[in-house]
Amino acid sequence: MLPPARGSAKTLAMSQKPVAELTEAVAVEELTRLADEIAQHDIRYYQDEAPTISDAEYDALKLRNAELEAAFPHLIRDNSPSLRVGAARSEQFAPVEHGVPMLSLDNAFSDEEALEFEARVRRFLRLEEPVFFTAEPKIDGLSASLRYERGVFVRGATRGDGRVGEDVTANLATLKEIPKRLVGEGWPEVIEIRGEVFLGHEEFAALNASAAAAGQRTYANPRNAASGSLRQIDPKVTAARPLRFFAYAWGYVSSPFAETQWEALQKLKAWGFRITPETRRVEGPGWLLAAYREMEAVRPKLGYDIDGVVYKVDRLDWQQRLGFVSRSPRWAIARKFPAEQARTILEAIDIQVGRTGALTPVARLKPVTVGGVVVVNATLHNADEIARKDVRIGDTVILQRAGDVIPQILGVVPEERPPGAEPYVFPSRCPCPLQTPVARETTASGAETVVRRCTGEFACPFQKLAHLRHFVSRRAFDIEGLGEKQLTAFVQRGWIQEPADIFRLARDEDRLAELRAAEGYGETSVRNLVAGIEARRTIPLDRFIYGLGIRHIGETTAVVMARGYGSAAHFLEAMDKVAARDPAAVEELDAMDQIGQAVIDAAAAYFAEDHNRRMVRNLVAELTILDTEKPKSDTPVAGKTVVFTGSLERMTRDEAKAQAESLGAKVASSVSRKTDLVVAGPGAGSKLKTATELGIQVLTEDEWLALVAG
Ligand code: IVH
């Protein structure tokens, strides 16, 4: 699946017109669009951990919003993005109200803006003499607040919306760099320590590599990985991730403990926290700029992401006097680094065909180093994106790598377009030898999407190859000795047309003999290949289902279906019925956890196709498919979906979940019409309310224990 269409931000919400030329009516319209757009990106960033625009693009939207608000202050909306920090928190964790709100920082994007900040501070304080500032690296992670009472770590929370965060105490407690008890002396009786949770580059790479190997989703950048790792339901998962923590600020304190930011940082260090070693104390405007340059220079050597420098007025009494404007302090500013960009030549645009026939344009670039990495490819997403950016072969393109795995093409440099470069025409035919026509995909309601698909389906050799590649991939059948190269060669020889052919090949003595004699093969590699194939002749049901490559049926869904059906026979019988839209079979599938209409439609379409049915039948004939153990069925809660909410007093959440699951129940985190039981303890809120509204049975913790005991 392609990521959601991106970039609409630039075309929709932001006009290019100078603010001074805008009429009030146009400004209102643009502010409305900006508010919507930014809110959506906030959700993608903070809640989904899946941003669809780069930080620089996001900053540009916020900047435009701020400019408009400065020019039209009476038009500032109640829900203005400038008044909001972060996005609403998720419901997974209990809410924690911060003793002092966790605010955000204003940004400066140039030397001029940094100098203006310095001058503003002096003007405000009516000072002639230079002011001391700390210059601290701006760590690119997620902020957390740690409450210590009498030196003991009692609660840890995410920032959330700035006022109320999420209680992630158990998860934060697993971090080595977060002291469970403060050491030394002189700490206030109660103090909220603020700092950044983050993941180093090496740890990030290792985490993604093992996630990929285990068939789990990978993270786009270290910040998302840190956020995802911290917001795990199971603290054991967090504990296994090498998250780090730098302390740089504080919230509520029961008594003052320092006179300057610098002194405060030294105290945090003495109490057992890590502080950023690059932090400097500098005096006057020249040194502010020098500190930025210095930070820029050390950035590549740090081993973790920083996205700028934070300047803070050193004297705390002056910070106090400076105070806040809306949600940011007047005494601090973040001087942001520009996202790492480079220019290079677009040498070609290749079209890749996925297993479902989706055509994805890939930019082939003249190799260029961006942020320490040599980049040769970048995604162009889809035809609309190419047209919107008017990217042409031969163009000099601006490439950006903002910690993301896939580099983005921001746009072209029009002055450097070679003469005669023609607009790119997205192919109307599949690049495969059959050159089947391409169709623009429509949604169920008939709306056109950005996806173009090859209409050749099973006939298209590229689609077929992509499909087979999926079949042998690690998370599916994981056939050792049958990599991309071998697979392509066998497909070209006409030996492998469909998955069953792989297993037929393993016992086709004539072909194996031919292979032994072929260049590049030999006795050993053929023996290994046969062993690799034979090892997968017996396969668990979930891998079998996933290997079929049905749209929308990823690994998780495959596991759910395998559990639901138990055996291959049952699965196949049910699929035939779903294809025939048999109401009972559709209902059975729909009732499975997390399965919705998209999966039902995809399964029905797949099994309605004769070609697919034949292919599956041939494959099944070659295999032994292992049953998936069905959850227990003879307990009072077997097959029921249970939600625990509020606080439990006789067991921990983890215990309750494990117990319910061992008795064949499914434990869900949110209440929906698929929920059978809600166990509510003291403090239960919105979930309990929803349950009552939906008429779902609600039990107390004691009633639940009696039920499962009985
Ligand atoms: S001070 C009232 N110091 O940047 C200001 N923030 O945009 C409190 N950050 O939410 C923040 N390094 O997540 C501060 N040395 C540093 C920082 C830092 C990273 C993050 C933090 C904050 C965001 C502000």
Image (spheres, rainbow, N blue to C red):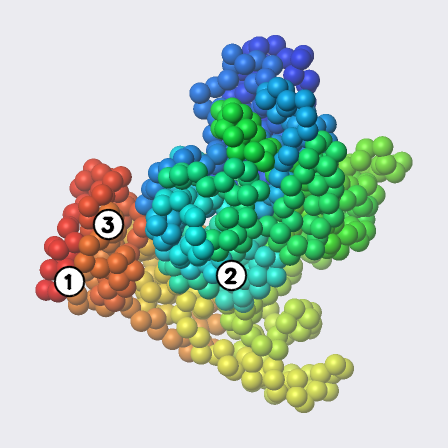
Say what amino acid the circle numbered 3 marks.
Ser
Q: What is the distance, in whole Å, between disc 3 and disc 1 at their CAs?
A: 19 Å
Image side of residue 169 versus residue 194, left or right? left
Image side of residue 524 versus residue 324, left or right? right
Q: Position of residue 412 (x, y in %)?
A: 77, 37
Image side of residue 461 versus residue 705, left or right? right
Q: Which residue is mark 3?
A: 647
Q: Which residue is mark 2?
A: 242
Q: Ligand 1: give its quadrant.
A: top right
Which label belongs to residue 708? 1
Identify the secondary structure beneath mark 3: loop
Q: Nearer the viewer, residue 168 or 499?
A: 168
Q: Nearer the viewer, residue 59 or 213?
A: 59
Identify the secondary structure beneath mark 1: helix
At x 81% / y 40%, what residue is drawn? Answer: 395
Q: Position of residue 196 (x, y in %)?
A: 52, 47
Q: Position of residue 405 (x, y in %)?
A: 63, 52
Q: What is the distance, in whole Å, between disc 3 and disc 2 at their CAs?
A: 29 Å
- Tell which circle, 3 or 2, labels the residue nearer the N-terminal end: 2
Q: Quadrant of residue 391?
A: top right
Q: Nearer the viewer, mark 1 or mark 2?
A: 2
Q: Are marks 3 and 2 in contact (CB under 8 Å)?
A: no
- Tell which circle, 1 or 2, labels the residue nearer the N-terminal end: 2
Pointer 2 local density, CA inside 10 Å: few below 14, some 14–19, many at least 20: some
| For residue 621, above or below residue 107 | below
Q: Position of residue 292 (x, y in %)?
A: 70, 40
Can residue 449 be seen here?
no
